[in-house]
Image (cartoon, rainbow, N blue to C red):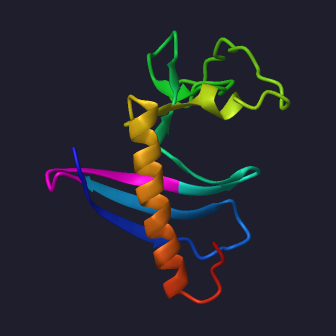
Amino acid sequence: MDITEVRIFLKDSPDKKLKAYATVTFDNAFVVRNIKVIQGTQGIFIAMPSRRIKQSCPKCGFKNELRARYCNQCGTQLPQTQHVTPEDSSSSQLEHKDIAHPITQAFREILQKKVLEAYEQEAKKHTGYIC
């Protein structure tokens, strides 16, 4: 599988951790959108597109945010899920689930390398962006 195109969409706020979004095309046949380019404490990396996990209301079945206290549809108090302490670095991982992601570490490294190279090229074109 070849990565045939990488498009980068820079974010306007350089002081934030989210630096850009990427759209990656594979074999001119399949596209993955909303790959995030993020500045972390140990350098820049990519995060795959994800969605928030929902929980169903036991009374009406409406899907609410995972940590909601009351149902947004019927107002019933929802059973509380385990709360994660702020010290737990994976707390956001427990609330989000990847929509698409690489299966192997080797392909993840290839994908990250291609996206970050495209990000650096796009950032050089725009003044005020620092890689």
Residue 125 in the image: above or below residue 23: below
**Residue furthest toward the left?**
29
Task: Name the one closer to the observer, 35 or 116.
Answer: 116
Which residue does the image show at 44% across and 59% down from the upper left?
115
Q: How many marks?
A: 0
Residue 14 in the image: above or below residue 73: below
Locate residue 71: give its quadrant.
top right
Residue 121 in the image: above or below residue 64: below
**Residue furthest toward the bottom?**
127
Locate residue 16: give its quadrant.
bottom right
Side (left or right) of 130 relative to 101 = right
Does the segment drawn in magenta span residue 28?
yes
Does the segment drawn in magenta span residue 52?
no
Which residue does the image show at 35% across and 67% down from the upper left?
7
Question: Where residue 33 sits: x, y (%)?
Answer: 35, 53
Q: Which residues are magenta?
A: 26-36
Side (left or right) of 115 relative to 39 = left
Side (left or right) of 106 relative to 43 = left
Dominant secondary structure (helix, strand or loop) of the stretch shown in magenta = strand
Q: Is residue 42 visible?
A: yes
Question: Where residue 70 sits: x, y (%)?
Answer: 65, 24
Task: Name the one closer to the observer, 92 or 69.
Answer: 92
Side (left or right) of 14 relative to 65 = right
